[in-house]
Image (cartoon, coloured by chain):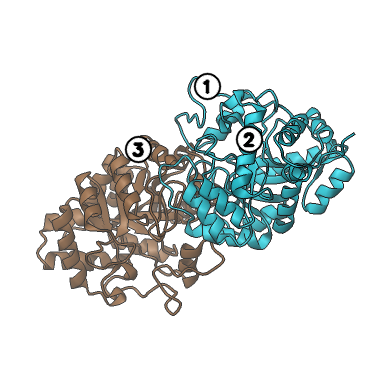
Chain colours: A cyan, B brown
């Protein structure tokens, strides 16, 4: 029988339940970065953290709060999953740079500088123009570096992303996206971003969200694994991991909220459309945390070595987090 | 004896006191737009409004809350001053477009789309790059137009300002700034902005803040009045008013707060410098609300007619507000 895999997932936002946490355990997920904010301000984010504190008690047989790398190793040894908090937007720090440390004290370890739109710090990938990192953004990146909070540019625009890589004194992450050479979505990343990310010790979490996949919901496992191989050629095998963006059991109202928050009176469909507004169906080979094993097998099948697959599945994320926290 | 002047001031942020309100009354200030937010979020702004509600009770012999144009006329008839609320930043609406209406219900009638830095809506004049109005900015301008809240671009960057003028279906205001041809400060405005503003029925409130004045604190009344004449040549006499930016009796800690808020760990000196960090001294001919009369006389002295001076002193603002609220 094969050794139990060690998996870290770069991003999930599921409709949390005993079933999902149990699948994480059975699927050998040592840790996952979970989103605790899309558009929420500080106060609202604190309420989300309070909800997680309840889950940590209620599901203490399955999950632990991941605050450092030891928590991940311990969770893995105990057959549990470490839950690492992250923000998809900088809204929880509001206008206040001191809130970076406050949010870190409350457990946050990742923060995207922008989510689709312009933020106080950086530009999102759906804006027409991208002026790069703002005055406050320069200050906040420095503060995140000091505190040990990972700069995540998954939903940011190109220039902002390149500048964040350059400005940050610690490696940064793109927790959930794919290369645009494979599937040209606004959310996917260009070769030069991937190269700069890799050159500075950063990491890309490869996404399983259908809008980021070639042929979307019909994407094949083989196509996905071939993409991983091409990405590794650009970035090196030490710089890629998983970032599934799994939104299991979420109603369509959640993707509508992600896209629209409270910033518009019109309806923004993001990567979807009027006729395809909801969550797209997951490819049949990746629907739950039990399915990472399919990708692990697929990577072996196209020629990745056992140790390379172990890196992609979790060890790269672990090494990255050691440098980051 | 001359008729009592009718004066509206486009912006003040003084250390409010009985003395200052009394000077407003004695100086014939029918109304002034007062700043109730620089960096505050919604909750903090509500606290500032609560403080004003107390002032309206305590100083009910001197001031009234100005919610519409009738309040201004009534205040003038009763020898009082109408206080009109405005935000120097969009921070009170946080990420929520619905808060435009909420803030209007609480009395806010002006909102700057950005204050020096990049905001969620527009770019401030101290950013290196100006990408123009953001996705959320387009939505919020439309909402402000619907609700009747004035778009103010005093501290915004050039492209953002020009785009706001173009996007807004109602005329916009630059409540406190001077032309950059007269004094080239980042906060002052270029000729093309002034022309576009005037062409669309907007208004410029001319600033008495020394960093916006030629020769700063040493600026002469004659120089200021000549500048008004040159500005009127560009904009027309119907499009300029006062926007004194008077910060009477404020300690230097207040200008430090205006510049730094909570967005940086370093110290930003704005228009000042390390050796000149505080409020600059006001020119000797404009120190309190009793001194507008000096400018009114100065404008007459350089050849403005009585009716032109009446427009600049208050009637232009009144006409603008009729179109805006």
Q: Chain of mark 2?
A: A
The circle on residue A226 is 2
- Name the residue carrying label 1: A276
Question: Which badge, 2 or 1, comes first in the chain's sequence?
Answer: 2
* Image side of residue A72 versus residue B138, left or right: right
Residue drawn at (63%, 60%), measured in percent from left and top?
A: A170
Residue drawn at (58%, 44%), measured in percent from left and top?
A: A154
Quarter location, residue A53: top right
Query: Front-most of A218 and B305?
Result: A218
Q: How far is disc 2 from disc 1 in space, using C-alphas? A: 27 Å
- Name the residue carrying label 3: B145
The answer to whether marks 2 and 1 sit on the same chain is yes
| Circle 1 Cα neighbour tier, 10 Å, few/some/many (<14 / 14–19 / ≥20) | few
Q: How far is disc 1 from disc 3 in space, using C-alphas? A: 32 Å
Could you say where residue B225 lies in the image, as x and y percent from the top left?
18, 67
Could you say where residue B269 lies in the image, as x and y percent from the top left?
45, 70
Residue drawn at (52%, 33%), measured in percent from left and top?
A: A260
The answer to whether marks 3 and 2 sit on the same chain is no
Q: Nearer the viewer, mark 1 or mark 3?
A: 1
> Which element is circle 1 on?
loop
* Image side of residue B312 versus residue A103, left or right: left
Query: Is residue A157 visible in the rendered structure shown here?
Result: yes
Q: Is residue A239 above or below residue A136?
A: above
Query: Is residue B31 visible in the rendered structure shown here?
Result: no
Could you say where residue B30 lies in the image, as x and y percent from the top left?
29, 53
> Which element is circle 2 on?
helix
Classify the position of the N terminus of chain A by image quarter. top right
| Circle 2 Cα neighbour tier, 10 Å, few/some/many (<14 / 14–19 / ≥20) | some
């Amino acid at each position: 029988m094969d050794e139990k895999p060690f998996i870290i997932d770069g991003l999930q936002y599921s409709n949390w339940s005993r079933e999902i946490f149990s699948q994480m355990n059975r699927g050998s997920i040592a840790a996952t970065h979970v989103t605790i904010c899309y558009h929420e301000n500080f106060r609202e984010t604190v309420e989300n953290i309070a909800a997680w504190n309840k889950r940590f008690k209620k599901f203490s047989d399955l999950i632990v709060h991941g605050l450092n790398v030891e928590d991940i190793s311990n969770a893995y040894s105990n057959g549990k999953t470490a839950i690492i908090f992250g923000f998809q937007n900088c809204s929880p720090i509001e206008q206040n740079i001191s809130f970076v440390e406050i949010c870190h004290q409350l457990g946050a370890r990742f923060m995207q500088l922008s989510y689709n739109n312009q933020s106080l710090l950086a530009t999102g990938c759906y804006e027409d123009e991208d002026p790069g990192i703002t005055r406050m953004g320069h200050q906040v990146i420095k503060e995140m570096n000091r505190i040990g909070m990972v700069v995540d540019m998954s939903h940011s625009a190109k220039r902002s992303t390149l500048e964040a890589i350059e400005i940050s004194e610690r490696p940064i992450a793109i927790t959930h996206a794919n290369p645009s050479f494979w599937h040209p979505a606004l959310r996917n990343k260009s070769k030069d971003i991937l190269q700069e990310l890799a050159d500075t010790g950063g990491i890309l979490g490869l996404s399983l969200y259908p809008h980021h996949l070639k042929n979307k919901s019909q994407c094949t496992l083989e196509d996905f694994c071939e993409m991983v191989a091409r990405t590794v050629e650009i970035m090196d095998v030490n710089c890629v991991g998983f970032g599934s963006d799994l939104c299991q059991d979420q109603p369509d109202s959640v993707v509508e909220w992600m896209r629209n928050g409270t910033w518009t009176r019109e309806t923004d469909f993001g990567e979807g459309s009027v006729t395809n507004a909801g969550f797209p169906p997951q490819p049949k080979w990746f629907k739950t945390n039990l399915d990472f094993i399919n990708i692990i097998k697929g990577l072996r099948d196209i020629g990745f070595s056992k140790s390379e697959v172990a890196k992609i599945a979790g060890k790269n994320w672990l090494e990255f987090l050691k440098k980051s926290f």
